[in-house]
Amino acid sequence: MTEVSWDALRASAVEAAGNAYAPYSRLNVGAAAVCDDGRLVTGCNVENASYGLGLCAECTMAGQLRLTGGGRFVAVACRSGTGELLMPCGRCRQILYEFGGPDCLLDTPRGVLPLRDVLPDAFGPDDLPEKKP
């Protein structure tokens, strides 16, 4: 198991929020994750004038995971640009589950919890029908 420095992970999320593009909500969001190989990946929210097409920080972080070698999320922190803890929305919890699984740790208002507790009875890759050749 990769060692997690939660203070450093939270600080990386705040730093990532500094790169956000949030001219509409003015809520800069950053996400940071430790990967199973010890690598750190981050993401920030990117809004759009049509509102619904904006990307959450966790979405851009998942893209960074794939762009920098893949692997799995082990621990995730989400913060505003001023350091406030922010909980991932439902869509982002699903993305975190896809790339981290039920054991991925998430910083929450109730403390650090595994995704299985944050997204109970989650739907994931194992729930899809088996591929037929």
Image (cartoon, rainbow, N blue to C red):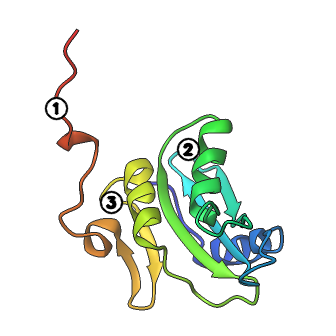
Image coords of residue 48 (percent x, y): 72, 64
Q: Three-letter amino acid code at disc 1?
A: Pro
Q: Looking at the rendered structure, which numbered label has been put on residue 45?
A: none
* Distance Cα–Cα, label 2 vs label 3: 15 Å
**Of the residues shown, which amino acid type is indicated by label 3?**
Asp
Relative side of 133 to 79, left or right: left
| Quadrant in which the N terminus appears | bottom left
For disc 2, the neighbor class at 10 Å (few under 14, some 14 to 19, many from 20) is some
Residue 30 location (% of width, % of height): 68, 71
Residue 133 location, quadrant: top left
Which residue lies at the image location 39% right of the left edge and 61% below the top edge?
Answer: 104
Residue 54, image x, y percentages: 65, 63
Residues tagged 1 and 3 counted as in contact (Cβ below 8 A): no
Of the pair 90 and 73, the residue shown nearer to us? 90
Q: Is residue 61 left or right of residue 131?
A: right
What residue is rendered at 49% in x and 64% in y?
A: 75
The circle drawn on residue 37 is 2
Above or below: residue 126 compared with residue 12: above
Tag of residue 103: 3
Query: Which label's residue is closer to the chain start, 1 or 3?
Result: 3
Q: CA distance from mark 1 to mark 2?
A: 29 Å
- For disc 3, the neighbor class at 10 Å (few under 14, some 14 to 19, many from 20) is some
* Vertical order, 27 against 54 (above or below): below
Q: Amino acid at mark 2?
A: Asp
- The residue under the point 54% across, 66% down is 4
Crowding at dot 1, Cα within 10 Å, few <14 / some 14-19 / many 20+, comes out as: few
Q: Secondary structure at mark 3?
A: loop
Q: Considering only vertical position in the picture, is 123 above or below 28? A: above
Q: CA distance from mark 1 to mark 3?
A: 23 Å
Q: Callout 1: helix, strand or loop?
A: loop
| Residue at the disc numbered 1 | 129
